[in-house]
Image: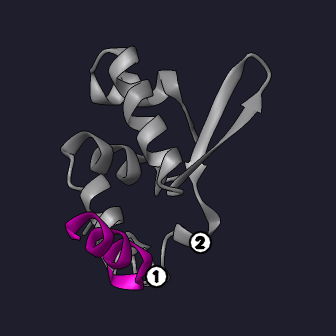
């Protein structure tokens, strides 16, 4: 019965919001989103600023892509990452819109 209840919770907007907040609960993923607020970035640029292993950064980018928060676009031999259009910075400063709430990076 509990798994059915969890599926019901995840199907609700509040469940979706909670899932997105869980993804963003990681400091590295928050740092990636904060960088992407400034504009699209290649992995090398983000890696240089964050100073973590590229494989770990790639893992976090995959989690963010799977959650629909980040998009990836081929740019020659590299991949250019950016915030998904529906999450893009709000007009109220450095913030992202999750639909259920705004997260500010002020």
User: Looking at the picture, does residue 13 appear above or below residue 55?
Assistant: below
Image position, residue 45 (x, y; %):
48, 27
In three-dimensional space, the C-alpha distance between marks 1 and 2, rounded to whole angstroms, equals 8 Å
The image's colour scheme reads one colour
Range of magenta residues? 1-14
User: Looking at the picture, does residue 40 appear above or below residue 43?
Assistant: below
Q: Give the numbered dot on residue 99.
A: 1
- Any magenta on residue 5? yes
Circle nearer the N terminus (1, 2): 2
Q: What secondary structure is marked by label 2?
A: helix
Residue density around tag 1, few if under 14, some if 14–19, many if 20 or more, within 10 Å: few
| Residue positioned 43% across, 76% down in the render | 11
The residue where tag 2 is placed is 86
Q: What secondary structure is marked by label 1?
A: loop
Q: State the residue in front, 65 or 8.
A: 8
> Could you tell whether 2 is left or right of 97 in the image?
left
Image position, residue 65 (x, y; %):
52, 46
User: Looking at the picture, does residue 33 appear above or below residue 100?
Assistant: above
- Any magenta on residue 10? yes
Residue density around tag 2, few if under 14, some if 14–19, many if 20 or more, within 10 Å: some
| Residue positioned 40% across, 83% down in the render | 12
User: Looking at the picture, does residue 23 appear above or below residue 73?
Assistant: below
Quarter where residue 88 is shown: bottom right
Residue 30 appears in view: yes
Residue 100 appears in view: no
Image position, residue 56 (x, y; %):
33, 22
Q: Give the numbered dot on residue 87.
A: none
Quarter where residue 101 is shown: bottom left
């Amino acid at each position: 019965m509990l798994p059915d209840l969890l599926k019901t919770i995840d199907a609700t907007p509040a469940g979706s919001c909670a899932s997105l907040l869980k993804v963003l609960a990681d400091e590295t993923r928050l740092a990636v989103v904060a960088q992407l607020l400034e504009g699209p970035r290649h992995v090398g640029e983000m890696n240089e600023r964050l100073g973590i292993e590229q494989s770990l950064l790639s893992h976090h980018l995959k989690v963010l892509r799977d959650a629909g928060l980040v998009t990836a676009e081929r740019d020659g031999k590299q991949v250019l990452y950016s915030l998904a259009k529906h999450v893009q910075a709000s007009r109220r400063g450095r913030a992202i819109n999750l639909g259920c709430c705004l997260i500010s990076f002020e």
